[in-house]
Image (tube, rainbow, N blue to C red):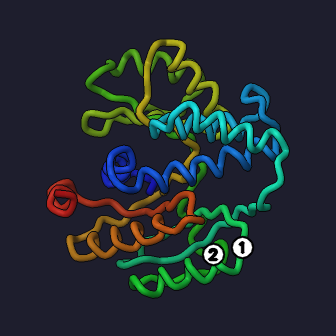
Amino acid sequence: MSGHSKWATIKHKKGKTDARRGKLFSKLSRAITVAAREGGADVTMNIALANAVEKAKSYSMPKDNIERAIQRGGGGADGAAYESILYEGYGPAGVAIIVEVLTDNKNRSAADIRNTFSKHGGQLAQPGAVAWVFERRGSIIVDGEKYSEDDVMAAAIDAGADDVVQDGDEFEVLTQPGDFGAVRDSLAAAGIEFDQAELTMIPKNTVTLEENDARKTMKIVDALEDSDDVQEVYANFDIPEDILERLAG
């Protein structure tokens, strides 16, 4: 789950520690292999591959796994032909949802996504119905307890970042897609480590959820993310911190 919600951070941390770890690594590996197959195995020359590798690193995917995924794609080995597809829909309380899929069977994925929406009180929509709610941005999460705002701002803004937003004990560095790599590299060169770095879909507005709708929305997001074909789920919900603590506890 990506977007401006503390639930996104909790999901990220869960991915490092619970039973989702193996499935998450499989999805990250698939994205790396496809990027290497389509654009070559040289990370310095293949922006899509560089972004996929950086995302895998931010989820603590082992270096050996990353290298094997690059070799599978860069070596031109025979394998399934994957297709990237975006599905759009609505969840509880009118939450806008975009599901990013990487699949070798479009019919299977379409049926799976449709059934998940229906089962959890959501509804698939036509292409473009909710896409306008989001914009493609680069997002880099930095631990605010380890680095000062001045240090993060200096490295990020000088490299072309749009903004640095503080959310609790974290800084989120936002960039345009074309500036993402330069800003990420500038932070690294300044010795600033980041907890997460990815191209994502940022909602232009959010729906603040009451506890019942928050529980339903988290269930549909969980169910979508559990699909082997789903790479990422974007939704424009926000959950008040007191409700989130109860639901995540």
Would you say residue 33 is visible in this rendering?
yes
Kind of residue sitting beneath label 1 = Asn
Q: Which secondary structure lies at badge 2?
A: helix
Please state which of residues 107 and 127 is positioned toward the viewer in this rendering: 107
Q: Are marks 2 and 1 in contact (CB under 8 Å)?
A: yes
Identify the residue shown where x is 72% and y is 67%: 104
Dot 2 alpha-carbon crowd within 10 angstroms: few under 14, some 14 to 19, many 20 or more: many
Please state which of residues 133 and 10 is positioned toward the viewer in this rendering: 10
Name above or below for residue 78 compared with residue 59: below
Dot 1 alpha-carbon crowd within 10 angstroms: few under 14, some 14 to 19, many 20 or more: few
Question: Residue 203 vs residue 170: left or right?
Answer: right
Could you give the CA–CA distance between mark 2 and mark 1, rounded to whole angstroms?
Answer: 6 Å
Kind of residue sitting beneath label 2 = Ser
Would you say residue 132 is visible in this rendering?
no
Point out residue 249 in the picture as x, y percentages from the top left corner: 16, 57
Numbered mark located on residue 109 in the image: 2
Question: Residue 5 vs residue 168: left or right?
Answer: right
Point out residue 245 in the picture as x, y percentages from the top left corner: 17, 56
